[in-house]
Image: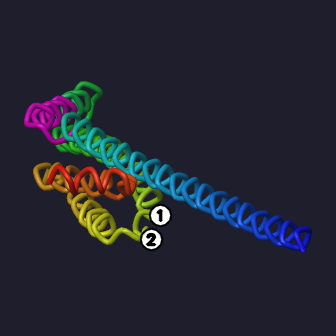
Amino acid sequence: MDKLIELAVSVVSGGLVALLTWWLTTRSRDRQDEEREREALRGHADALVVAVSDLRAAYVVNRMLWERGPEILRTVALTAIAVLGGATRAPIAGGTDMQGALVGAGRGAELLAQERIVGKQAVAVLREPFNRIATAAAPLLRCPAPALVTATEELLSAAESVTDTGRLEEKLAAFGQAAMVATTPPPTRRERRRAGRSG
């Protein structure tokens, strides 16, 4: 009888140890999976912030190069010089005043066409940051945190109108806050107890 009791105790204690080991292993694996998910979410959030910053920088550079008053005046002055140069060159070569005017207009149109092409190429540079923003935002729009999904959507909307830098800054800050909340691990039982005692 003692042997039977010993065997039963041994089986029960072995089963309890196996059950406890399984529970601890599963819990540890779940925590590791959750941490990996949070880390991936942090990576996507960082990529989105960097892409939005690149978009902002490209917009500022583009604006400095092409949209400022001195740049517009420079284009007008260069066009005027090209028109005058072409207009004076034709009569010197034996052409009429009308031919000179046509040559000058042609030189001015050529210069403006070149400026337009270069300006469009500069605007096309903004396409790459937009592509990176969309790539970084896609996984964030599927995450289980509704506040982060909303903040991502609002940031995408603000990035589309990059000219409104105040709104873009506001939505970027709101996105950063939502990303921080979504990627912060929940408090442990011990931390909740401590907070309950102190609160």
Seen in the image, is 195 located left or right of residue 46? left
**Marks 2 and 1 in Cβ contact (< 8 Å):** yes
Determine the image quadrant of residue 27. bottom right
Crowding at mark 2 (Cα within 10 Å: few <14, some 14-19, many 20+): few
Amino acid found under the numbered disc labelled 2: Arg
Name which residue lies at 29% across and 55% down.
193
**Which label belongs to residue 142?**
2
Residue bearing the label numbered 1: 139
Determine the image quadrant of residue 13. bottom right
- Residue most extreme to the front: 1
Q: Is residue 76 magenta?
A: yes
SS for callout 1: helix
Q: Quadrant of the N terminus?
A: bottom right
What secondary structure is the magenta-colored segment mainly?
helix
**Residue segment shown in magenta:** 66-82
- 148 or 198: which is nearer to us? 198
Name which residue lies at 23% across and 52% down.
195
Crowding at mark 1 (Cα within 10 Å: few <14, some 14-19, many 20+): some
Q: Quadrant of the C terminus?
A: bottom left
- Residue most extreme to the top: 92
Q: Is residue 171 magenta?
A: no
Name which residue lies at 64% across and 64% down.
23
